[in-house]
Amino acid sequence: MKHLRAWTMAVGIAAFTQLASPVLATEDDEMIAERIHSTLPLYTFDWEQTWPRSFSSGDDFGCTSRVAFGDWHFTPNPDSDSAEERWESFANYGVFHCAAIMRTSSEQADLDEAKWEYGFFVRLGTTRKGSTKWELWALQKGTVPGSEYTLLARQPEEAMIERFTVLQQRCPTGTQLQAKGLDIWLTRYCAINSRGELLSLARKMLSLPPLGVIERVVKAD
């Protein structure tokens, strides 16, 4: 029996745009990427657009993804005063149990030693901006306790996905939680606990200037 190698990927789409880490902003005209957290992961394998996911075909089986594994570089929007350039690494976990191993670092050379967590790429849905169709995606990072999300968007193309637009993240009314009395330490985040809420937020964020672009690059020697 042939075992599909862990790096095997499915045919997907090609237009990657933007990704960003949580940034606290206080002015309405600032670009904001607040932390989004759900009590439990919102997307599991019952959602057909959760990647990587398992497949089998004859004697072949393994984990496949529409999003390319490898090193990705985030380039901030030049108009952003808070978002910083950074690197992300996405690797396949294995053959029998599917997940992406996600790492973040300020330098590409440090990715292999960076802290990691399990995560998934999720296509939330679609929308239109003017006459242009967009796919709305998210990185779903972590499983316990719950997950965190980075909102992404792309224009559909029939190829492996290697580029995303990274959207702003602003807490919808009634979702912001924040503890008091911890001096300067950040406790604020958006508590979003339904797929509908997350999709609605992504659609609204697409109408705002993006945080930047994240795209796959060849790993440096």
Image (tube, rainbow, N blue to C red):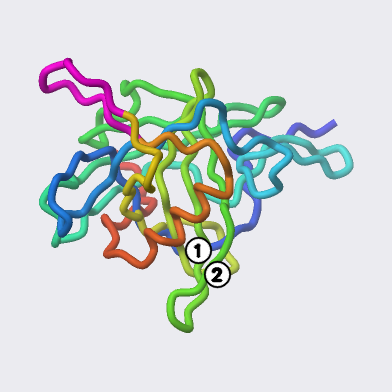
Q: Nearer the viewer, residue 65 or 18?
A: 18
Q: Quadrant of the N terminus?
A: top right
- Of all residues, the one furthest to the top in this rendering is 182
The overriding secondary structure of the stretch rendered in magenta is loop
Q: How far apart are marks 1 and 2 (CA)?
A: 5 Å
Amino acid type of the residue tagged 1 in the rendering: Ala
Q: Which amino acid does label 2 sit on?
A: Glu
Identify the residue shown where x is 31% and y is 53%. Answer: 168
Q: Residues within 10 Å of mark 2 (few under 14, many from 20)?
A: few
The answer to whether residue 131 is left or right of residue 11 is: left
Residue 211 % position (x, y): 26, 55
Q: Where is residue 165 in the image (x, y as percent from the top left)?
A: 37, 59
The residues colored magenta run 178-189
Tell me: 1 left or right of 212.
Answer: right
Which residue is found at the position 42% from the left and 49% from the top? 151
Q: Position of residue 193 (x, y in %)?
A: 53, 36
Q: Residue furthest front?
A: 174
The residue lying at 32 percent from left, 21 percent from top is: 113
* Element at label 1: loop
Q: How crowded is mark 1: few (under 14 residues within 10 Å), some or many (20 or more)?
A: many
Residue 11 coordinates in the image, percent (x, y):
64, 57
Picture quadrant where residue 77 is located: bottom left
Front-most of residues 196 and 147:
196
Q: In this view, does 126 lie above or below 90?
A: below
Does the stretch in magenta take in 187?
Answer: yes
Please report contact status of discs 1 and 2: CB closer than 8 Å, yes or no.
yes
**Which residue: 27% across, 57% down?**
212
The secondary element bearing badge 2 is classed as: loop
Residue ID for mark 1: 14
